[in-house]
Image (cartoon, rainbow, N blue to C red):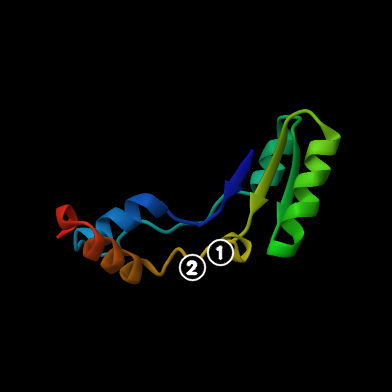
């Protein structure tokens, strides 16, 4: 299992921004997912860079069993900053008449 940590209710935050609502109460601190997984007897790993993702995934597959990988903010550089919602909203509105 890979968890993309954004320290927020990212999708709800994005939808609120798309509808013009202010950003209120959508950011918070995530728990330590690796420690949480280990408390249940699950192997947990953390990755904080794009370069570290493949070796971490390979090690998880090699170990077998249930594995949890927590990808840090902003998702190890794998995607753009989740906070940069306005440009994405504008692009999607331009592509879809239903969002105008």
- Quarter of the view holding residue 17: bottom left
Image quadrant for the N terminus?
top right
Q: Which mark is residue 81?
A: 2
Left/right placement of residue 63 relative to residue 26 reads right
Residue occupying the point 76% across, 30% down = 41
Q: Secondary structure at mark 2?
A: loop
Instruction: Please indicate whether residue 67 sits to the left or right of residue 91 in the image.
Output: right
The x, y position of residue 12, in whole percent, is: 33, 50
User: In the image, residue 4 lies at what x, y percent?
Assistant: 56, 51
Compared to residue 58, the image places residue 72 above or below, namely below
The residue under the point 26% across, 56% down is 16
59 or 46: nearer the eye? 59
Counting residues from the start of the chain, the first of labels 1 and 2 encountered is 1
Determine the image quadrant of residue 77: bottom right
59 over 51 or under it: above or below: above
Q: Which residue is mark 1?
A: 74
Image point 78% across, 50% down: which residue?
A: 56
């Amino acid at each position: 299992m890979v968890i993309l940590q954004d320290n927020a209710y990212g999708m709800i935050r994005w939808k609120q921004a798309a509808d013009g609502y202010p950003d209120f109460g959508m950011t918070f601190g995530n728990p330590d997912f690796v420690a949480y997984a280990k408390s249940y007897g699950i192997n947990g790993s953390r990755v904080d860079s794009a370069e570290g993702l493949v070796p971490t995934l390979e090690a998880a597959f090699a170990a077998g069993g249930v594995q949890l990988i927590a990808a840090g903010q902003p998702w190890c550089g794998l995607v753009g900053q989740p906070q940069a919602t306005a440009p994405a909203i504008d692009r999607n509105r331009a592509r879809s008449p239903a969002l105008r």
